[in-house]
Image: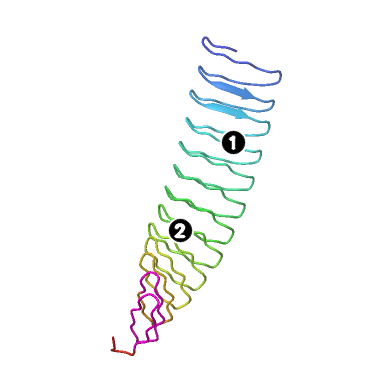
């Protein structure tokens, strides 16, 4: 049944309702309702609901609800809720909540909270809190606060603050500020500043 200004091509055993300027190709046993400005191609046994300007490809037995400007690909038995401009691929049994502008890949049993523009990969039983522009990999029971462009590996119970381009390994209760290319081993309660290629052991209160 064609209304003035409409166009529809129907193959034997197919059913299609087309409104002006719409395009719909439906295979046998399929149902498709298309609103103006929408486009949908449905393979046998598939079901899809499209809002204007949205794109969704759903495999049989899959479910996908897409809000305007969102894109999601869901494998059977998967669940994905995506906020505008976000992208998330979730494997079966995994859970991922993504805030705008964030990206996270979560393996089963893992937990990750990422602030905008941050990246963190967390292994099971690990905890990582990352401030904007910082990067940190934390082993179980470790604590590390790293300033932008810094690198720090901290063993349990240790504390270290590293300035850009510096490297320092600190034992519990020790304090050491090392300039690039310098080496300093400090015993508890001692303070030492070492120039490249020099060695200095300083007793408390000495310079």
Residue 60: image quadrant is top right
Q: Which residue is mark 1?
A: 57
Q: Position of residue 68 (x, y in %)?
A: 46, 36
Would you place residue 11 above or below residue 30 in this image?
A: above
Between 47 and 138, the residue placed more toward the observer is 138
> Callout 1: 10 Å neighbours few (<14), some, many (20+)?
some
Question: Residue drawn at (34%, 82%), measured in percent from left and top?
Answer: 192
Residues shaded magenta:
178-202
Q: Position of residue 4 (x, y in %)?
A: 52, 9
Look at the image and tell me in which quarter the C terminus lies: bottom left
Would you place residue 196 above or below residue 61 in this image?
A: below
Considering only order in the chain, which callout, 1 or 2, is on the residue closer to the N terminus? 1
> Callout 2: 10 Å neighbours few (<14), some, many (20+)?
some
Between 155 and 185, the residue placed more toward the observer is 185
Q: What number is the disc on residue 175?
A: none
Q: Are the residues flagged by discs 2 and 1 in contact, CB closer than 8 Å?
A: no
Q: Position of residue 19 (x, y in %)?
A: 52, 18
Local secondary structure at mark 2 = loop
Residue 167: image quadrant is bottom left
Would you place residue 125 above or below residue 30 in this image?
A: below
Q: Which residue is mark 2?
A: 113
Magenta stretch: dominant secondary structure: loop
Local secondary structure at mark 1 = loop
Residue 184: image quadrant is bottom left
Left or right of 101 in this view: 1: right
Between 194 and 203, the residue placed more toward the observer is 194
Question: Residue drawn at (54%, 54%), measured in percent from left and top?
Answer: 95
Q: Position of residue 112 (x, y in %)?
A: 49, 59
Look at the image and tell me in which quarter the N terminus lies: top right
Question: Residue drawn at (44%, 75%), measured in percent from left and top?
Answer: 169
The number of numbered badges drawn on the structure is 2
């Amino acid at each position: 049944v064609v209304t003035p200004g409409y166009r529809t091509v129907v193959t034997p055993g197919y059913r299609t309702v087309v409104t002006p300027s719409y395009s719909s190709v439906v295979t046998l046993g399929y149902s498709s309702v298309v609103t103006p400005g929408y486009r949908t191609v449905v393979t046998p046994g598939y079901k899809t609901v499209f809002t204007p300007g949205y794109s969704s490809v759903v495999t049989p037995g899959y479910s996908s609800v897409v809000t305007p400007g969102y894109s999601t690909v869901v494998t059977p038995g998967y669940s994905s809720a995506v906020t505008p401009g976000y992208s998330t691929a979730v494997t079966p049994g995994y859970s991922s909540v993504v805030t705008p502008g964030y990206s996270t890949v979560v393996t089963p049993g893992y937990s990750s909270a990422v602030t905008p523009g941050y990246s963190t990969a967390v292994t099971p039983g690990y905890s990582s809190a990352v401030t904007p522009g910082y990067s940190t990999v934390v082993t179980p029971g470790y604590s590390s606060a790293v300033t932008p462009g810094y690198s720090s590996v901290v063993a349990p119970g240790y504390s270290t603050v590293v300035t850009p381009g510096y490297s320092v390994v600190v034992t519990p209760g020790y304090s050491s500020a090392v300039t690039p290319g310098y080496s300093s081993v400090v015993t508890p309660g001692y303070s030492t500043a070492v120039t490249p290629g020099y060695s200095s052991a300083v007793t408390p209160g000495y310079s």
